[in-house]
Amino acid sequence: EPEVTQTPSHQVTQMGQEVILRCVPISNHLYFYWYRQILGQKVEFLVSFYNNEISEKSEIFDDQFSVERPDGSNFTLKIRSTKLEDSAMYFCASSEALSTGVGYTFGSGTRLTVV
Amino acid sequence: GENVEQHPSTLSVQEGDSAVIKCTYSDSASNYFPWYKQELGKRPQLIIDIRSNVGEKKDQRIAVTLNKTAKHFSLHITETQPEDSAVYFCAAPAAGTASKLTFGTGTRLQVTL
C-alpha cells in the first residue's frame, strides 16, 4: 500500500532556530496538507497545497510558516523562528482530489521538540 | 468555521462489549464524516467514513451512523478487542472550505480483559 513518508521522525531544535520538515506524498496525489497535533490534543489543520500554491491555511499558519514543493517529490514545511509552543507532532497528508478528507493518507509524523 | 464536539473523552469497556463514540458538528452543509484511529505515537488512520446521502455504514465490527437533522454522527464498535484500544477522532469539513478537516477532541478507548 502506498505511503506518505516523513523525515525526520524526531527533531529537536533550539528556540529561534529554523526547521524544515520533509514529506514525500504518494506519487499520484496532487493535493498536500500539513496538520499538527500538540501532545494529548486534537489534530489541527495548518495548510493545504495544490498546483504549487497554498489552497487554504489556518490562523495557526502565520508568517513564521511556509510550504514548498521544491521538486517533483518532496513537500516541505518550514518554520522560520521556532517557539516553544511549536512543539508538536506534525503530520503531512496527501490526497488525489481536493475533497475534505476523502482519500487522505497521513504520514507517520515528525515530532518537533523546541527547547 | 466548523465546530466538532466529541464525547466521551475517555471510554473504558470490557473485551467483547460495545463502544459508542458520538460527535456533533455545526455546519449543516458538511457532507463527509470520517473516523480516524490513532495508536500511541502513530499516525491517524482512517477506519470508516460516511457521506451525507446515507444514514449508516458498516464494516465488520465497525459502523457509523449519521443523523443530518440533529447534526451528529456516531462510531459503533461491537465485540471490542484489546487491539481496539486507541484514541479515536471524528472529523468534518470546515465550513466554506474545500480542503480543511476539523477534528474532534478525541476519545481514548481502553478495552480491558
Image (cartoon, helix red, strand yellow):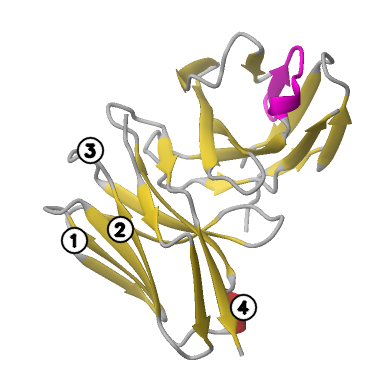
Task: Indicate the position of residue A74 as horizontal and vertical percent values.
Answer: 71, 28
Mark 2 is on which residue type?
Ile
Chain label for disc 3: B
Q: Within 10 Å of the Cα at label 3, are there few (<14), some (14-19), or many (20+) other Cα atoms? A: some
Q: Which circle's residue, 4 or 2, is located before the other in the chain?
A: 2
Q: Are marks 2 and 1 in contact (CB under 8 Å)?
A: yes
Q: Are marks 4 and 2 on the same chain?
A: yes
Residue at image position (55%, 39%) is A94
Task: Indicate the position of residue A54 as horizontal and vertical percent values.
Answer: 50, 17
Which one is nearer the viewer's eye here, A96 or B40? B40
In this view of the protein, can residue B51 be seen by the observer?
yes
Q: Which residue is mark 4?
A: B83
Give the mark toward the camera: 4 or 2: 4
Chain label for disc 4: B
| Residue B11: in magenta span | no
Q: Are marks 3 and 2 in contact (CB under 8 Å)?
A: no
**Which span of residues is magenta-colored?**
A70-86
Structural distance between the alpha carbons of marks 3 and 2: 16 Å
Give the mark toward the camera: 1 or 4: 4
Q: Are marks 4 and 2 in contact (CB under 8 Å)?
A: no
Structural distance between the alpha carbons of marks 2 and 1: 7 Å
- Local secondary structure at mark 2: strand
